[in-house]
Image (spheres, grey):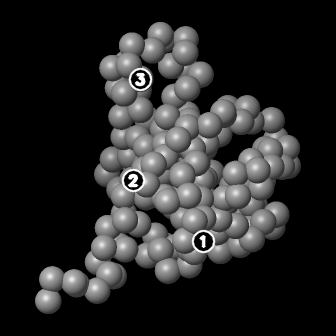
Amino acid sequence: MAVLTIDELASALLPGQAIGGLDLGTKTIGISVSDLGRRFATPREVIKRVKFGIDAEALLGIAAKEKIAAFVIGLPINMDGSEGPRAQATRAFVRNMAQKTDIPFVYWDERLSTVAAERALIEMDVSRKKRADRIDSAAASFILQGALDRLTSLAKDAAPDSAD
């Protein structure tokens, strides 16, 4: 398994491959999956964290079922750009996953993704209790959608200009 940049992922992906988005929390792992055209991120069920081996097995089961070619994982960077304990825990999780899978991971700056997800759920009039259950997968969708939008932008930049 490799850790790739978003640019490297754009070059490595084949048409029709789905990507998974992850929001790694202390109690849950929020999951989102792209469509095969990589235009839309859709939230999935969260994984309730138990211990790493069980969490990894659950995640890889979802990856196999959804035919995920890569994961975009939110990297919780502080607002000042520094990395704290949560970012270190995320990097450790990815290092441990490297021993269990060849699926590549891409780190994605997730600043404000949970805030944006919560606002979207509030706007949809989702109750506080249901928001608590859905927030991690909604955040994973915001993370993945940002990466999908970047991949689309990279593909447009790489396409030959037909206006000439």
The residue type indicated by label 1 comes to Val
- Residue appearing at x 45%, y 15% in the figure: 126
Residue placed at 41% from the left, 23% from the top?
121
* Residue pointed to by mark 2: 146
Give the mark, 3 or 1, whose residue is nearer the N terminus: 1
121 vs 65, left or right, is: left
Task: Name the residue located 29 percent from the left edge and 78 percent from the top edge.
Answer: 157
Q: Determine the image quadrant of residue 113.
A: top left
**Which amino acid type is marked by label 2?**
Gly
Q: Position of residue 124 (x, y in %)?
A: 38, 19
Secondary structure beneath disc 3?
helix
Question: How many numbered discs, if any?
Answer: 3
Residue highlighted by disc 3: 121
N-terminal of the pair, mark 2 or mark 1, is 1
Question: Image height check: is 73 above or below 7?
Answer: above
Horizontal and vertical percent position of residue 7: 43, 76
In the image, residue 16 sits, relative to residue 163, either above or below, namely: above
Image quarter where the N terminus lies is: bottom right
Q: Earlier in the sequence, mark 3 or mark 2?
A: 3
At horizontal 60% and vertical 71% (from top left) the residue drawn is 3
Residue at the spot of label 1: 3
